[in-house]
Amino acid sequence: MTTKLSAAATLTWLLLALGGTVQATEVVSVGRVDIQLPGEGWQSHAVPDQGNAISGIGLTHRQQTETRVLLRRAPDQTIDAVFIVRANVTGKGRFSGVRFPDARCEGPAGTFAEGDPPSPAARSFRCLYVSAPGAVGDPVTYFRQMQSALDVTSWKLAPSMHLMAAKQYANTGAFLDVTALVAPEALPTLTDATGQAAEPLPAGVTPASVQWGRLLQKAVTDSVYSIRGKLPVPDLLTSGAPSQSK
C-alpha cells in the first residue's frame, strides 16, 4: 500500500490550498488518526486519495483512506519539516486475516532501514527508514518540484533535509504511513542510549536522525494498535531563527 503523487497534482493542490495555519495546540485528523504537532508554524493541506482494496477472510473491501500534507515554517519562512500522512478511515475492525506476504522493509540506496522481515504468512508489517540529507534523489526531487508553488508565498524548503518513512500495517486493515522531510537543525539531540543503532550507519545518516525516526516509528505503531489512534509527533527544534544583531 503506497501513495504516489504526481508533481503536477502537488503543485495544483499546494497553490489552491496554501493558507489555514494549524495552531500547535490543535489536533489534525487524518483518517482515524489524531496527530498532535510539535511547536508552531504548521499548516495542513488535504491531498486526493483513492483508497485501498484490502482482502481478508475470503472477502475484498474497498477501504476509505485519507492523506494530508503538513508543513512547518521556521522563523525565516523556510519550510524545515514536511509530513505526508496517510491512514485508513474505514477498515479497522471490519476485516481480519489481512496478510502482507510481499512486504519488505527497505529504503532507497544509502538509507538506514529496520523493520519486520518478509514472510509469506506475515500478519502485520512495520518499517522505518532514514536517509542522509540530500542523499535520496527521487523523493527529494518530488518535494523540490513544489518550489515554483512555494515561490508564490516567498517560502522555500530548507536546503538539506533527512528523508524518513515510518509505516505500520495491521491484519485488521488499520494502517498508518508517515513520510517526512526534516532539516537536520530541527532534530533534537537525544540522550537516551536505547535510541542508538547497534550497527554502523550509512554515510550521512546521523544518530540523532535514527533516534528521532525510532520515536516516530513507535508513535506510528502505537497509533495503529490503539483504540483512539492518537499520534504525538516527537519534538522538533525550531530551526532557521533569524540571527540577533549586536
Image (cartoon, grey):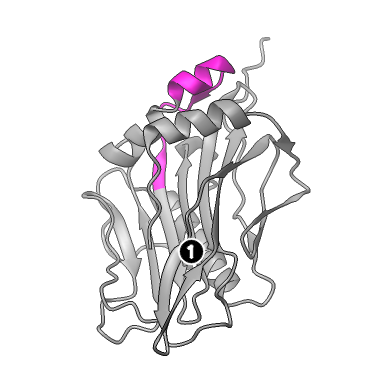
13 left or right of 55 in image: right
The quadrant holding residue 198 is: bottom left
Q: Nearer the viewer, residue 145 or 133?
A: 145
Question: As shown in the figure, which amino acid type bears the numbered disc 1?
Answer: Gln
The question of residue 154 being in magenta is answered with yes
Mark 1 crowdedness (10 Å alpha carbons): few <14, some 14-19, many ≥20: many
At 52% from the left and 46% from the top, the residue drawn is: 48
The range drawn in magenta is 147-163
The quadrant holding residue 112 is: bottom left
x and y percentages locating residue 10 in the rendered image: 46, 34
x and y percentages locating residue 139 in the rendered image: 34, 41
Q: Tell me the SS state at disc 1.
A: helix
Classify 70 as above or below 130. above
Q: Which residue is mark 1?
A: 217
At 66% from the left and 47% from the top, the residue drawn is: 38
Quarter of the rendering occupied by the N terminus: bottom left
Classify 136 as above or below 244. below
3 left or right of 109 in image: right
Classify 126 as above or below 232. below
x and y percentages locating residue 52 in the rendered image: 44, 64
x and y percentages locating residue 114 in the rendered image: 33, 66
Quarter of the rendering occupied by the C terminus: top right
